[in-house]
């Protein structure tokens, strides 16, 4: 799927795909977005996490040119969303959190309408529709009335519509909300394929475990501010905020032997004794140090049968992190921004 | 992989919105049902009119049913046109295509206008048949049919404008009342005219605005005004769904100003000055309704668009920037133009009464800003309800208080306190008091633009930080630096 010449706006590959810089947006006295800054490189899949009312949707709507910033700026593909909304719209695919379809209109007519609205004509339009419907597996449903489809099918229709103009950047607001497990897996697979094709994707979701599987990076927003960013794996291990790793060790001997060993070992604290071993807190996060600890255990004669890093649920990690921020134990750390361009 | 069949039902050059609306609209049961019932009835009426004797009554029914379909049923198809998009949250997806808010509402209107035209054209064979059987004026009949279609599509634009209100009951009240009154009025007019004249010939010179003005206005002027009314109504709708950063207000206000200037020019150079003055006043009232109900804009890029044009841009900003505060300045400008025209064409008293009428609109806008209604998401519904409430009060006061004054032949000076009541008081005032009454009324009416001016200044100052941001954006761009 490549853009035809008259539809392809210039994209500045030297700049990140998305730059949000000190974005503010208020609704009366309510500060919905309060100084949000982040950037996303080309081809990255980024999860946008936050409670209801945290400012996710407002930020995403401004990025999609559906709302305007109070101050600050957003650049998509190097184009300012306020100054060049038409160019930005051609680069963007938008999937809202909830939407309806049209009565008395088949799936094919629905796609045809949006393809027309995007300015495609004749054979080019048909090709676009065919590609989008094939990708989302909607071709067998072409003659189905669009308002009589299941939630999963409707979500695929919305994704197909968003892909009609082959956007380089996709913004998806709660795309998995309300889907049954099968439809959720289907959607996740489609997003994976899009990511493999090099699309830049920003997804918000309440189902954090899914985001963890799909996303390279997670952005956490709370009360209109980015409070944290990092990769999902380190979030789940808790290593990104504490600099420590929780390891669960089981041995084929009395747990006391392990406890005795741990009391004398450097960098290790005993978190809890378990039935067949112990949970140890190691003051390191890198693989080499963790492997070194295991090696020492074996060298010291401990019959280790299980040694693995503990992973929290992403939801727990998020709540834990918010708690730490509230108590002042953790400072908010918005991701660094690239050098501003001269637009 | 199977392939999809290309859709060739509508050509590429048609607006996507029109194609969508036609695909949906032509499939509805309502359209098919109306078409079927209409044709069954028309066949019946045509056969009945062939029997002579009762031709006049049958003609009345013939006209009535066509008027009902073209001027009531089809315009009402726009009842939920925009509300449905808002409810289903499909509007965002439309905005992200190449469709502007204006094209979206135009597409919805054009679809209804096309369906209406389809029905009007399908009626033509019956008109010819009645001409063959009954010997009626064919040209007159076709002209009347055209006016019905035109009236219907203007009403459709009005209904679409009000369909931007999400609440069903609100639309039902706002659309229902005027449409019921207008539709019934039009139906009665056509039927009564038909029955009294016996044929359609008397209606060939029918002119709504001509009737209002007490004279005849040329057909091109009337057609032009119908087009402007459609533009006005669709502009009203587009404003309510356009993105916050839209500069639609600039286009609308520029067009309104040009239309008003054309009317002033026509009044100056033709013999229709007095009639066109009434038309200008009606136009002014509608424009004031629009500009005084726009939310004050808080998007820096909107103001930056003016600042980029230097001094001229800053002057234009004061009159054309979206929002009721600049709308007030714009309404002052238009009122001054209409007042001068009225003075020229109909004398000083008429001009003074015109200013008092304008003050009634400013009074409503001022009340809107003083009351908690100023926080409303859309100022149009509270404005309309205030207007309806005020009319009710005026009617009650007129019947309760004016009657004793009128019977005793005493001038009702108290009516000077309320601009909408003042024309009634003026009409019943003693001849010797009229000049003084107008003077007092005018000074009293002046209170409301002053109150609104204060509110406008406060609202304008409220956008100071936004305008400062716009100023920074403009200068950052001019300087080639990063925009803030």
Image: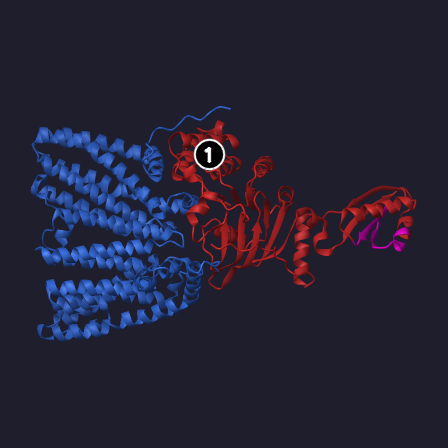
Chain colours: A red, B blue
Q: Identify residue for label 1.
A: A148
Res. B325 image quadrant: bottom left
Badge 1, how many Cα within 10 Å: few under 14, some, many 20+? Answer: some
* A205 on left or right of A314: left
Does residue A173 appear to the left or right of B238 in the view shown? right
Q: Is residue A263 magenta?
A: yes
Q: Is residue A292 above or below residue B24?
A: below
Q: How many marks on residues?
A: 1
Q: Position of residue A146 (x, y in %)?
A: 45, 34
Q: Is residue B56 left or right of residue A142?
A: left
B135 or A301: which is nearer to us? Answer: A301
In the structure shown, which secondary structural element does the residue marked by tag 1 occupy? helix
Horizontally, is A163 left or right of B42 in the view?
Answer: right
* Horizontal and vertical percent position of residue B262: 17, 55
**Which residue extends farthest top?**
B2
Q: Is residue A280 above or below residue B342?
A: above
Viewer-proximal residue among B212 and B13: B13
Q: For residue A171: magenta?
A: no
Residue at (45% x, 43% y) in the render: A9
Residue B369 percent across, percent down from the top left? 35, 66
Which residue is more in the foreground, B93 or A239? A239
The magenta segment: A261-283
Image coordinates for residue B275, horizontal then vertical, percent: 12, 56
Residue B277 sits in quarter: bottom left
Residue found at x 21% / y 41%: B149
Is residue B133 in sight in this rendering? Answer: yes
Question: Does residue B399 appear in this view?
Answer: no
Chain letter for mark 1: A
């Amino acid at each position: 799927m490549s853009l035809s010449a008259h539809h392809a706006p210039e994209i500045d590959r030297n700049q990140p795909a998305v730059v949000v810089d000190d974005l503010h947006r208020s609704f009366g006295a309510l500060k919905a977005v309060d100084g949000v800054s982040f950037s996303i490189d080309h081809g990255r899949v980024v999860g946008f996490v936050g409670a209801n009312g945290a400012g996710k949707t407002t930020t995403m709507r401004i990025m999609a040119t559906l709302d305007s910033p109070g101050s600050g700026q957003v650049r998509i593909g190097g184009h300012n969303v306020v100054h060049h909304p038409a160019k930005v719209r051609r680069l963007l695919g938008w999937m809202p959190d909830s939407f309806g379809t049209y009565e008395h209109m088949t799936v094919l007519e629905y796609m045809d309408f949006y393809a027309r609205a995007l300015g495609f004509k004749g054979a080019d339009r048909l090709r676009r529709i065919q590609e989008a419907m094939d990708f989302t597996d909607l071709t067998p449903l072409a003659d189905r009335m669009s308002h009589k489809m299941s939630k999963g099918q409707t979500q695929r229709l919305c994704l197909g519509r968003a892909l009609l103009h082959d956007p380089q950047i996709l913004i998806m607001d709660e795309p998995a909300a309300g889907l049954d497990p099968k439809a959720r897996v289907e959607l996740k697979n489609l997003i994976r394929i899009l990511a493999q094709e090099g699309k830049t994707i920003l997804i918000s979701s309440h189902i954090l475990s899914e985001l963890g599987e799909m996303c390279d990076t997670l952005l956490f927003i709370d009360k209109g501010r980015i409070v944290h960013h990092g990769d999902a794996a380190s979030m789940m291990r808790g290593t990104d905020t504490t600099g420590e790793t929780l390891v669960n060790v089981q041995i084929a001997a009395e747990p006391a032997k392990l406890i005795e060993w741990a009391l004398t070992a450097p960098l290790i604290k005993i978190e809890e004794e378990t039935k067949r071993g112990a949970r140890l807190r190691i003051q390191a996060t890198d693989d080499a140090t963790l492997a070194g600890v295991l090696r020492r255990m074996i060298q010291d004669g401990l019959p280790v049968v299980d040694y693995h890093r503990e992973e929290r649920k992403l939801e727990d990690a998020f709540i834990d992190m918010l708690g730490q921020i509230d108590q002042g134990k953790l400072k908010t750390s918005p991701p660094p921004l690239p050098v501003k361009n001269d637009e | 992989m199977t392939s999809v069949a290309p859709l060739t039902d509508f050509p590429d050059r048609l607006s996507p919105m029109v194609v969508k609306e036609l695909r949906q609209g032509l499939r509805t049961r309502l359209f098919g049902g109306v078409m079927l019932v209409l044709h069954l009835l028309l066949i019946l009426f045509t056969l009945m009119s062939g029997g002579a004797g009762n031709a006049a009554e049958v003609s009345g029914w013939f006209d009535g049913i066509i008027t009902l379909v073209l001027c009531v049923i089809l315009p009402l198809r726009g009842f939920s046109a925009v509300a449905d998009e808002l409810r289903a949250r499909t509007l965002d997806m439309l905005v992200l295509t190449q469709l502007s808010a204006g094209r979206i509402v135009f597409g919805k209107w054009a679809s209804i206008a096309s369906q209406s035209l389809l029905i009007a054209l399908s009626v033509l064979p019956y008109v010819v048949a009645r001409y063959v059987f009954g010997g009626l004026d064919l040209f007159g009949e076709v002209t009347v049919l055209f006016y019905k279609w035109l009236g219907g599509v203007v009403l459709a634009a009005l209904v679409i404008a009000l369909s931007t209100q999400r609440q069903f009951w609100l639309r039902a009240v706002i659309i229902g009342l005027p449409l019921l009154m207008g539709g019934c009025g039009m139906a009665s007019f056509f039927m009564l005219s038909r029955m009294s004249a016996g044929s359609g010939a008397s209606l060939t010179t029918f002119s709504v605005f001509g009737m209002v003005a007490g004279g005849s206005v040329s057909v091109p002027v009337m057609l032009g005004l119908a087009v402007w009314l459609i533009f006005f109504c669709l502009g009203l709708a587009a404003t309510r769904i356009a993105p916050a950063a839209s500069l639609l207000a600039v286009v609308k206000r520029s067009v309104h100003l040009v239309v008003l200037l054309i009317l002033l020019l026509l009044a100056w150079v033709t013999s229709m000055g007095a009639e066109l003055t009434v038309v200008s006043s009606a136009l002014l009232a509608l424009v004031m309704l629009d500009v005084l109900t726009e939310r004050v804009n808080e998007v820096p890029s909107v103001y930056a668009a003016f600042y980029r044009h230097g001094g001229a841009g800053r002057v234009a900003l004061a009159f054309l920037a979206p929002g009721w505060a600049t709308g007030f300045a714009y309404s002052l400008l238009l009122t001054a133009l209409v007042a001068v025209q009225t003075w020229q064409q109909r004398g000083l008293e008429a001009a003074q009464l015109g200013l008092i009428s304008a003050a009634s609109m400013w009074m409503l806008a001022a009340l809107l800003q003083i009351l908690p209604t100023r926080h409303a998401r859309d100022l149009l519904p509270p404005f309309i309800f205030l207007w309806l409430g005020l009319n009710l009060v005026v009617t009650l006061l007129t019947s309760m208080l004016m009657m004793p004054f009128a019977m005793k032949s005493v001038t009702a000076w108290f009516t000077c306190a309320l601009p909408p009541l003042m024309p009634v008081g003026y009409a019943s005032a003693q001849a010797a008091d009229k000049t003084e009454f107008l003077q007092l009324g005018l000074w009293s009416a002046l209170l409301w633009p002053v109150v609104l001016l204060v509110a406008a200044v406060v609202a304008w100052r409220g956008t100071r930080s936004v305008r400062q941001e716009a100023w920074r954006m403009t200068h950052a761009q001019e300087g080639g630096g990063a925009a803030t």
